[in-house]
Each structure stands twice: as C-alpha cells, then as structure tokens.
Image (cartoon, rainbow, N blue to C red):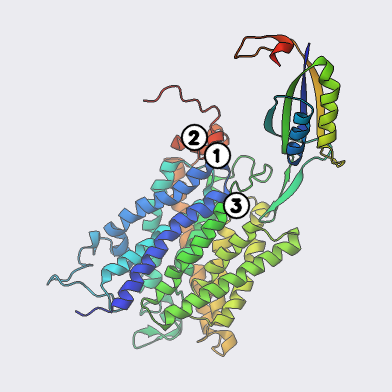
Amino acid sequence: MTKLVTAVIQPHRLDDVKSALEAAGVRGLTVSEASGYGRQRGHTEVYRGAEYTVDLVPKVKIDVLVADEDVAGVTEVIVQAAQTGKIGDGKVWVVPVEDVARVRTGEHGDDAL
Amino acid sequence: MEWDTGAAAWMLTSASLVLLMTPALAFFYGGMVRGKSVLNMMMMSFGAMGVVGVVYVLWGWSMSYGSDVAGIFGNPFDQFGLSGTLFDADGAAIASPLGNYPQVIDVAFQVTFAIITVALISGALADRVKFGTWIAFVAVWVTVAYFPMAHMVWGGGQLSGAEGSIAAAIFGTTDGAANTAPIDFAGGTVVHINAGVAALVLALIIGKRKGFGTEAMRPHNLPFVMLGAALLWFGWFGFNAGSAFGANETAGLAWVNTTVCTAAAMLAWLVTEKFRDGHATSLGAASGIVAGLVAITPAAGALRPVTSIVLGVVAGVLCALAVGLKYKFGYDDSLDVVGVHLVGGLVGTVMIGFLADEGGLFFGGGANLLVIQVVIALVAVLFSGLTTAVIGLILKATLGWRVSQDVEVGGIDLAVHGETAYENLGGARIVSEVK
C-alpha cells in the first residue's frame, strides 16, 4: 500500500527538507506555494496609518507519495529538517492512498512510486 | 522675429516633463490599488490624456486665455480650435505674452496642466466607477471647473491681480494692477485645491467601496508607487521651473525650492509615521514627496530655499495626519487626493502669506498678502465644490457612476476592460480558442 505524506512548512526550510528527503532516498515530490496560519496567526502591516492584519502568511506545501514501510522514516526526516523550534514551523500528516498509476508506463501501486 | 531660443527650448522641455507626470501618476495610483483594479486605475489617467488633449485645442485654450467673460472664464468661441492663437493676420507666429517665444508653446505647456489636474481626481474613485462615466466627467469637468479656474487665476480673471479682480476690489489698484496681488505660481488653487475639492465631493456623491474601512485594501505594488513618485518629482521640474516662462533665475529658484521642500516633506512624513505607527514606510516616503511637491507648487517662485524647508515640514506633517480623516468621517477618498492635494494645496497657498520673501507676514510684509491668499483659496474651494457637485449629481442621475457590486468585488479590470494585469488574477486562463 501507498501513503501520501503532506507537509506544510516555513518557506525558508524548503531547501533543507528537499536535500534531506533526497538523502533519505525519496525520488520525487511535489512542492506548491500555500498560505495559511496556525497558532502563530498573521502579522500587521500599516499603510498611510491604516493598520491591516494579514491573517494568511506564506507557507510551502510538500506532497510525497511513499510506500507503507517508509512512512515513519520520511515523516521524521521532514520534521527534523523543517524544525526551527518557533511557532509557525508547520505540520506533517499522512493519509492512505487507494492507488497510484505511473502515467508513462501504466504501472500501478508501489511499482509506480 | 528673433525668438529667445533658450526660453523656447526650456518651455518645450517643461511641457514634455509635465506631460510625463500623468503616466507617472498612473503608476503612483496604480500601485496603490489592489491587483484586480490596477488597469482601470491607470486607464483613468490615460483616458484623461486622450480627452483633454483633444478638448484643449478645441475650446480649452480659448476658455482659459480667450476674451474675458465676467472675470470667470474666457469666451470658448473666441479662439475655438486655436483660431487666431498661433498666427496673426499676416501669417506670422504670435508671440507669447509671457516670454519671447511663440505662443503655440504656451498651448503645449498649458494642456499638460489641464490633463494632470483632472487625472488627479481619479485617485478618489478607485475600483468602482464606470469608465464611460469617468470619460464624460473628464470632458465636462475640465470645461466647467478647470478652464474657468485657470482663467480666473492665470488669465486675468477674478483670482488674479488684474483690474476687476477680487484683489483689486479689496486693495485698490495702481496702474491697472492690484496693490496686493495673490500668488499662485504654478497651480496651488487651479490644480491642487481644485482637484482635491473635486475628489472630496465625488467621493461623497459616489459612495464607499464595498468593505471600505473593514476589509484590507492594501497597495498591491509599492515599487510602482515609488516609481510613480520619482517620475512625478522629475516631471514637477517642468511644472514649477517651467512656470517661470523662461530659462532664467526664477526657473532656477523654483527648481531648488521644489526639491528642498519635497525633501523636507518626505522626511517630515517619515518622522510622523515613525512616531505614530512605528515604521518609516516606502508608501510614506512616496506620499511625503507628493505632499511636498503639492505644497511648493503655488510658492515655488515666492520663497527662499530656506523657507521652503519650513513649508515642506509643515506640509509633510499635516498631510500625514490628514490622510486618516477619511476613516474618521467615512468618505472613501481611496488614494488620499483630499489628504495630499487639498490639504497640501491649502498649506502651500496660505503659507505664502507668512513666508513669501516679498509681502509675507514673517518678512515684514504685513497681513495683506495673507488675507488675499486665504481669500483665493476659499473662492477656489467654493467654485470647485459647487461645479463638481452639479456635474457629479447630473452624471449620477443620467449615466450612473457605480459598476455593479459583483464587478467591483470580482475586479473591475476584467469586467470593464476585458483584461487582467497579472496572470493569476483571471481564474483559469486556459485559452481554448484563438480567433
């Protein structure tokens, strides 16, 4: 079976997380720009004296498909590499994936990873 | 005839500089609105260039500088289409009354002022106004409000120092000129008070944007704002130093005063917001620059560089405080035309009465100049307010001002102009068919 590991992290940690995943043998991932907030909430900006609260701050979202037995390792690698210890570091979660197909060859399941 | 080619060259350069100010304003304003309405904001300035550029040669010049009607406007038919403006009966070029160069250069210089003045008003109307109504407004407003004001101040009308003017009535005349003449060097009343009052009146007639005061409407591109402010500063040398109508010591003084006042106003704005909000911002720098430029406009030929610093500081602080008034009173002057142009224009026009080298209260000139400066400022406020209210209300009842709320929220660029400024604003942009 396959799992989808999704991580929402601080944008400036992306390079470290990418290298760490590569070193751990992960061969592919998808990165997208995201915005959101957790416990850190947003920040305020002032324009000509008018104060705006910016709720949604920039984040990076990483999606990795991994085989069942690698899930714990990959999750740990991401947490280690993305961690700064400050509020706003993000979250990692895992969901089961019913099937995966490789478009080029038509392979299914773990063979497609 | 032997022309003063130095003066002619400088006045043509100045006209070109002032023309550049309107696209500069488009960037200044365009950067301050949200990304979904930047094109509409910029198009309001460009639209003004189109309309006024045509209207000016038809009846604009004639209404500003043609034969006087009651000291309020020039006869539009007198020099309609510039007939009799450029050449005399013998086919020789007519000289400017202001300097030894052809009068056609004055037409060039003055049309650029008319364009920028009406374009300034668009800053109060961000995100929510029908483009067609704006275009109609531009044509009517320059005709009813701008050309008469230019005539009254610069064409020998009620707000000048000529025979029959308000100043002549108050202080009497010697050899056909008022004993104390009002000073509006480059357009504190004609341009800035005029546009600022019009902006306030239109903001009240048209109403607030949906979400004004509650939703974040942060500027989408501050580098555009900085670029616009820089180009405005550059263009303003034509505006002020060009208003010397010659390449001479007055032009040099106006250049220096313009830069000094602007520099001081920028610093004053930054200091004000540093103490109030905790940061010296780029938007504050750009706004302080424009506040200083506005304040020195009427005074550029009448102050010393040192007194220009004083004017700049006063304008920078007052304008930085004034931009908050719209939240207090609840009018949506979106990009602070009132706070910067009306307040800056009033500050410059009135402070001439204190600071002018000749006739200023602080320089032993007595109170006469101060009195007449306050009078011309008030008349300008009333005239602009009344004419703009009439035009604004008529357009509201006929063409209508507002786009529908879904257009306003969804983005006026896409709905009104059929374009979006940036790739990610129009939703899915998959082109399925190219005609």
In the displayed structure, does residue B13 sit left or right of residue B220?
left
Reply above or below: B124 against A80: below
| Image location (x, y in percent) of residue B279 | 73, 59
- Classify the position of the C terminus of chain B by image quarter: top left
- Classify the position of the N terminus of chain B by image quarter: bottom left
| Image location (x, y in percent) of residue B239 | 43, 68
* Residue sitting at x 52%, y 44%: B38
* Mark 3 burial class by Cα count in 10 Å: few <14, some 14-19, many 20+: many
Which callout, 2 or 3, points at the residue further toward the start of the chain? 3
Q: Considering depth in this image, is A18 or B403 the residue closer to the camera?
A: A18
* Label annotation for residue B36: 1
* Label annotation for residue B414: 2
Whether tag 1 and tag 2 are in contact, CB under 8 A, the answer is yes
* Label annotation for residue B294: none
* Residue sitting at x 51%, y 73%: B258
Q: Amino acid at mark 1?
A: Lys
Dot 3: element: helix
Is residue A27 in view from this perspective?
yes
Q: Are marks 1 and 2 on the same chain?
A: yes
In the displayed structure, does residue B176 sit left or right of residue A34?
left
Q: Considering depth in this image, is B235 or B402 the residue closer to the camera?
A: B235
Q: Amino acid at mark 2?
A: Leu
Label 3 or label 1, whichever lies nearer to me, is 3
Q: Amino acid at mark 3?
A: Leu
| Residue receiving disc 3 | B222
Real-space Cα separation, disc 2 to disc 3, in angstroms: 22 Å
